[in-house]
Every structure is written in structure tokens, then in C-alpha cells.
């Protein structure tokens, strides 16, 4: 919790109240698994991180002014090592084309997550003035807007409540292994819902938070993207 507090304090010293993947450590601090990776601010450092990861990587622009990174071409999936430096420059150019005065913190270089064996879910929180922190769980990725298959509980949630959320959504069979797919690791998913519940309970300054996607696979979960707003 102390680590999380430090991360939030250093963030609140910036001029923006919006945080993105540069705050992934916050999830780490609460035991929510994130893919290996780092936010860097030069092509050389990006190449070094990619080399450490040792295979194709995902690269994302990191800017408080860009909320939907892929909408502006700010996410490149499957970047081979030899293209990391050029991709860094490309991502910055695209961000500048989108908004010339955008604050650019750098680029995140991230390990690839296997989406084929996983299901993209969304796990989020919205602080309601009346009810307090509302946890939202549902199908994520591109489906979140289309299907609107989500369920909501007031945090903090108990283990049975978290488990109930998974069963609540219409796409629940997808998580349980429909059409010959292996079921996702439900225990890890339940644990993650509870860990986020704890995080937003501990830090009332977080008014809004979205992990989208939270990729659920048979072997566990990975928080692939994060955005949050502080008050
Ligand atoms: P944004 O939501 O701002 O566009 P994301 O980080 O969510 O940015 O990336 C957009 C999409 O790219 C994700 O929904 C996912 O399908 C894919 N993606 C992002 N990161 C990874 C990763 N590490 N491994 C595999 N696919 C990824
Ligand atoms: Mg996203």
C-alpha cells in the first residue's frame, strides 16, 4: 500500500489528473498481474527493453492527452526487435499529428499477451457520489461498447460477490470454456476483482479506473491496459 501511495503522490504532482499505462506499477503493488514491460522516453531505451523481453513486443504511446491510443495509431502489436527504434519514432509522430501540443511521456514497450487463448474482459471502477466506488466487470476489448455485457457491484466486494460478478454477465459461458475452449482461471479473475476492490477502497482519490483489457486465460490474468482519473 505504501508503494501505491508513492506512485499516486508522484502522479498528483504532475499537472494532469489522468494517468495511463505509466501507472501500471499501481496494479503490481496490489498483486494484479501485468505483462513485463516499461515506459521509456527514447528509441534506444525502447530497444533495450525489447531485448530484455526477447521476442516481439507491443509498443504504445504514453500521453495523458491520448485516451484511446489505438484510435490514433498509438498501439503497435507484434513489433520485431529490429523495428523497435523506428516504431518509437512513428508512434511519436502519430501522436503529434493528432495533437501537436500533446504531452508525451514516452512509449510503453510491453510483452505480447496471447489473446487467442484468452478472453478480453474489462474491470473498472466509477466513484458514485451516492453509492461510492462502483466496480464494473464485463466483456472487454472491442466488445465492451457493442455488447454492453457488464455487471456492477459496490466496493468493497466479498469473494462470493466477486465470483457472482463473473457468473452475472451474459458471456459467462465464454469464460467457462464454450465451444471447446479451455475455461479461464476463474480463481485468478475473482482474486483480481477483489484486489482492485481493495485498491479503490484504500485510495478515495481515485475517482475512475479502467483495466481494459484485462486478459483472462486458462493460466491466469494479465492487466494489459490501464487508465485512471484522480480527483
Ligand atoms: P487503447 O485501449 O488505449 O487503444 P490498449 O493498450 O488497450 O490501448 O491496446 C489496444 C488493443 O491492442 C487491446 O485491446 C489489445 O487487443 C491489443 N493489445 C494491447 N496490448 C497488448 C499486448 N500486450 N498483447 C497483445 N495484444 C495487446
Ligand atoms: Mg484499452
Image (tube, grey):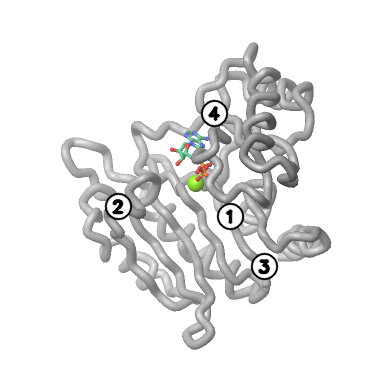
- Give percent across and percent down for residue 194: 48, 66
Instruction: Tell me the residue that label 3 is attached to.
Output: 230
Report how far apart the C-alphas of labels 1 and 2 lie in the structure. 20 Å
Q: Is mark 1 within 8 Å of ligand 1?
A: yes
Q: Which residue is mark 2?
A: 146
Classify mark 2: helix, strand or loop: helix
Q: Earlier in the sequence, mark 1 or mark 4?
A: 4
Mark 3 → mark 1, Cα distance in angstroms: 10 Å
Label 3: which secondary element? strand
- Disc number placed over residue 76 in the picture, else none: 4
Q: Quadrant of the C terminus?
A: bottom right
Q: Are marks 3 and 4 in contact (CB under 8 Å)?
A: no
Percent x, y for residue 200? 58, 70
Q: Position of residue 19 (x, y in %)?
A: 66, 55
Residue 77 coordinates in the image, percent (x, y): 51, 27
Q: Residue at x 48, y 62 (%)?
A: 124
Residue 227's disc is 1
Residue 37 visible in image: no
Q: Whole-Å distance between the Cαs marked 3 and 4?
A: 28 Å
Q: Nearer the viewer, residue 228 or 214?
A: 228
Amino acid at each position: 500500500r505504501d508503494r501505491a501511495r508513492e506512485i499516486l503522490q508522484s502522479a498528483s504532482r504532475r499537472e494532469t489528473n489522468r494517468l495511463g499505462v505509466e501507472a501500471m506499477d499501481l496494479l503490481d503493488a496490489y498483486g494484479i498481474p501485468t505483462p513485463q514491460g516499461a515506459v521509456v522516453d527514447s528509441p534506444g531505451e525502447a530497444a533495450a527493453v525489447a531485448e530484455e523481453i526477447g521476442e516481439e513486443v507491443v509498443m504504445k504511446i504514453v500521453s495523458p492527452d491520448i485516451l484511446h491510443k489505438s484510435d490514433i495509431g498509438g498501439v503497435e502489436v507484434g513489433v520485431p526487435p529490429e523495428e523497435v527504434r523506428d516504431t518509437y519514432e512513428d508512434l511519436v509522430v502519430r501522436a503529434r499529428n493528432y495533437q501537436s501540443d500533446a504531452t508525451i511521456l514516452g512509449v510503453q514497450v510491453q510483452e505480447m499477451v496471447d489473446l487467442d487463448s484468452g478472453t478480453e474482459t474489462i474491470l473498472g471502477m466509477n466513484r458514485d457520489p451516492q453509492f461510492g466506488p462502483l466496480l464494473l466487470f464485463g466483456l472487454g476489448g472491442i466488445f465492451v461498447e457493442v455488447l454492453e455485457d457488464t455487471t456492477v457491484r459496490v466496493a468493497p466486494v466479498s469473494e462470493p460477490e466477486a465470483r457472482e460478478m463473473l457468473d452475472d454477465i451474459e458471456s459467462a459461458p465464454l469464460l467457462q470454456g464454450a465451444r471447446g475452449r479451455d475455461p479461464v482461471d476463474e480463481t485468478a479473475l475473482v482474486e483480481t476483482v477483489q484486489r482492485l476492490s481493495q485498491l479503490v477502497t484504500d485510495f478515495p482519490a481515485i475517482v475512475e479506473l479502467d483495466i481494459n483489457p484485462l486478459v483472462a486465460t486458462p493460466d491466469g490474468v494479465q492487466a494489459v491496459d490501464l487508465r485512471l482519473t484522480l480527483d
